[in-house]
Image: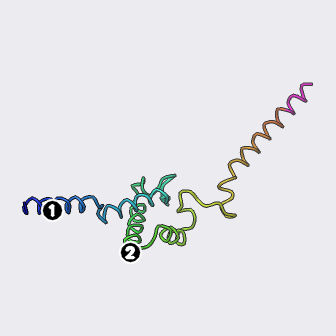
Amino acid sequence: MALLGLTALLALACAAVSAAPPAGAELEARVERLSTELRCLVCDNQTIADSNAQLARDLKGVVREQLAAGRSEDDVIAFLTQRYGDFVLYKPPLRASTWPLWFGPFILLGGGLWWLWRTLQRQQGDKA
């Protein structure tokens, strides 16, 4: 009976240990999640998670080191934006300095449509 109880306790202890994710796996998950929010500085339109460039691997290592040192994800992002500017963020924040990035394409599209409309109006006026 005691042997059966001891076996049950060992089984429960093993299950509890295996259910908790190892710190390394949790760290790698955080690194991957944060890597999808950071832009590769040498690649066109790629995150450091998707890029195979050496600089992207180096930045991923910096992210890993910072998170392993106990810094939060916001601290790591602040550290990288301080070094590289808002360009390192895959989705830059809406500020006065990033306003052209967010609204520039719409303004250019509107201007192009206005120019096309004016050109067509002039051509119809010349025919009449």
Task: Tell me how far mark 1 sits from mark 2, CA to CA.
Answer: 34 Å
Residue at the (40%, 74%) spot, across then down = 70
Residue at the (82%, 35%) spot, across then down = 119
Q: What residue type is labelled 1?
A: Leu
Q: In which quarter of the image is residue 15?
A: bottom left
Element at label 2: loop
Element at label 1: helix
Q: In this view, does 123 lie to the left or right of 91?
A: right
Give the residue pinned by disc 2: 69
Q: What residue type is labelled 2?
A: Ala
Q: In this view, does 78 lie above or below 123?
A: below
Q: Quadrant of residue 31?
A: bottom left
Q: In this view, does 73 lie to the left or right of 29?
A: right
Q: Give coordinates of residue 27: x percent, y percent.
A: 36, 64
Question: In this rendering, which labeled residue sits more in front, label 1 or label 2?
Answer: 1
Q: Which of 61 and 118 is in front in this view?
A: 61
Residue at the (75%, 44%) spot, across then down = 110
Q: Is residue 73 magenta?
A: no
Residue 117, which numbered label?
none
Q: Is residue 104 above or below residue 9?
A: above
Q: Which residue lies furthest to the bottom in this view?
A: 69
Q: In this view, does 18 lie to the left or right of 52?
A: left
Q: In this view, does 126 lie above or below 14?
A: above
**In terms of sequence position, does the residue under pointer 1 or pointer 2 come before the other?**
1
Question: What residue range appears in magenta?
Answer: 121-128
Give the residue pinned by disc 1: 10
Q: Quadrant of residue 124?
A: top right
* Chief SS of the magenta region: helix
Instruction: Classify the position of the N terminus by image quarter.
Output: bottom left
**Callout 1: 10 Å neighbours few (<14), some, many (20+)?**
few
Q: Is residue 125 magenta?
A: yes
